[in-house]
Amino acid sequence: MTQPTDVLDQARAHLNAGDPAQAAQTLAPLMAQEAPPLGVWHLGALCAEALGDLDSLPQLIQASHDQGVLDGSLMVRLSCYAGEPTAQGDASPWLLAMAAGGMLTSDAAPGSDPVVLVSNLLACGQSGIVERLLSPRAQASAPDWVALAQQTATALGFDAPDTAKDWIFIGGCPRSGTTLFRAMLNAHGRIYAGPETKVVRDLANIRDRWDRQATHQAGVSSEMLDRAAAAFTDQLLSEWGQGFPRVAEKTPGNLLHMRSLARIHPRARFIHVIRDGRAVVNSLMKVNWCNPKTGKSLWYCESVDKAALYWAENIKQIRAQSPGPERYLELRYEDLVSKPEAAMRAVLAWLNEPWDPAVLAHHTAPQELPAMETSSHDVAQPVHDQANSVWKRTLDAQDLATIHDGPAGEVLVELGYKEATPRGQVLLESLGLGF
Ligand code: A3P
């Protein structure tokens, strides 16, 4: 008499031989049993996946769970098909990580076959995930797997979008380490991140000023302004970064226009460099930028309270315009300088770019560091973390009280740079008895 486990083995053999229909047929009598053998539902789920029968998949996976047969990678694939985030968040980075770890190879479990995976993802309309699976980052980590995935996608008529216009816009409050970060990115073999053009920021600003009733009454709609701004920036950045697959433009004020830029450039990504406000205030006091026409200090370099307000407003205004975690990333200066490899690996993974160790030696890469950019001298040096604590020696108690008690205080707490002051402490401080 044939044992259920023999039937299970036969079904598995059919599946592994690329015949999921025969495998499903073999399994059917076992599934009809009152107490089906262990693993039946799991194998059934793999057959359904290979057959593209995604409607049955959730129930089969549930039944498999009920039997105590758990398959995390099948769960991840299911949530990708459904376009649902898993409990851990967006599932597609998991998929990528599995591809990178070689777990998604064509000779592993049948469901991880790129042909099956890509076909199902495209059938479910999850082209965004397919795009990530074909990204340069995935290619660098699992070239054979991605080549098969690419063949499948092409055969199914999937046209990967032109990533040349996936602009990267970098910004943040000036003196936050934005220039260092752009120079590190510029050392990457696939990315051009030259000096500040200021053009993207200024154009977004002008576009928003034009977006008013008088312009609309003259027959120029908001959408026309968006398209014209997109054409201008696309043309400019393509020429500026000619020869590079990705282009990053850093001008600190870019992200103050993130809402408009995200709409104008639907594939652009935004990186916000954030630094402890006390270090930024200290740095702004040190550089003391002036208006070249009047020779007077810029308002936010005039005093500690103004610099602190400027920092807090920058952070708040940028964060309020976030287009969501897929397109907006916060990078801490402190992380960048104290653990540059981990920080840059995270950034590049988020950009779907392969790791390139050259980013850790930006000072040896060809760089354009114009004399007119204040940070150029420092940026020519290797990454160091010495600027992290300078403010502790140079800001006095009065300066710190001014920062902590003003609008920046809340933002420092919100960002985790400072602990919230306990109520009793606030009272003591207000009486001049704090310590
Ligand atoms: P300090 O003025 O506190 O030294 P931005 O370019 O956004 O204006 O930021 C300037 C800050 O970046 C400066 O802070 C500067 O020290 C820091 N920076 C520049 N190059 C650096 C490097 N190679 N390593 C660490 N920090 C650097």
Image (spheres, rainbow, N blue to C red):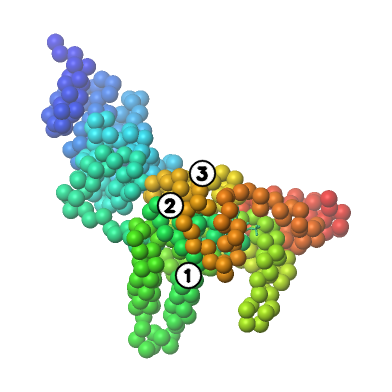
Amino acid type, residue under disc 2 in the picture: His
Residue 242 occupies quadrant: bottom left
On-image quarter of the N terminus? top left
Residue found at x 39% / y 44%: 93
- For the residues labelled 1 and 3, the Cα–Cα distance comes to 27 Å
Res 80 seen here: no
Number of on-image labels: 3
Is residue 327 placed above or below 72 in the rendered structure? below
Q: Are marks 1 and 2 in contact (CB under 8 Å)?
A: no
Question: Is 80 placed left or right of 318 in the picture?
Answer: left
Using the image as rendered, state which of residue 416 and residue 140 is in the foreground. Answer: 140
User: Distance between the Cα atoms at labels 1 and 2?
Assistant: 19 Å
Residue under label 1, please give it.
197
Q: Quadrant of ligand 1?
A: bottom right
Q: Are marks 3 and 2 in contact (CB under 8 Å)?
A: no
Residue that carries the numbered disc 3 in the rendered image: 341
Q: Residue at x 20, y 21 (%)?
A: 8
- Residue 373's image quarter? bottom right
Q: Is mark 2 within 8 Å of ligand 1?
A: no
Q: Determine whether the residue tagged by mark 1 lies in a helix, strand or loop.
A: loop
Percent x, y of residue 311: 63, 64
Is label 3 or label 2 in front? 2
Q: Could you tell me which secondary element the residue under label 3 belongs to?
A: helix
- Residue picked out by circle 2: 188
Q: Disc 3 marks which amino acid?
A: Glu
Checking the image for residue 132, the label placed there is: none
- Residue at disc 3, CB closer than 8 Å to ligand 1: no
- Indicate the amino acid at tag 1: Thr
In terms of image quadrants, where is residue 114? top left
| Circle 3 crowding by C-alpha within 10 Å: few under 14, some 14–19, many from 20 | some
Residue at 61% of width from left, 49% of height from top?
Answer: 384
- Which one is earlier in the sequence, the residue at label 1 or at label 3? 1
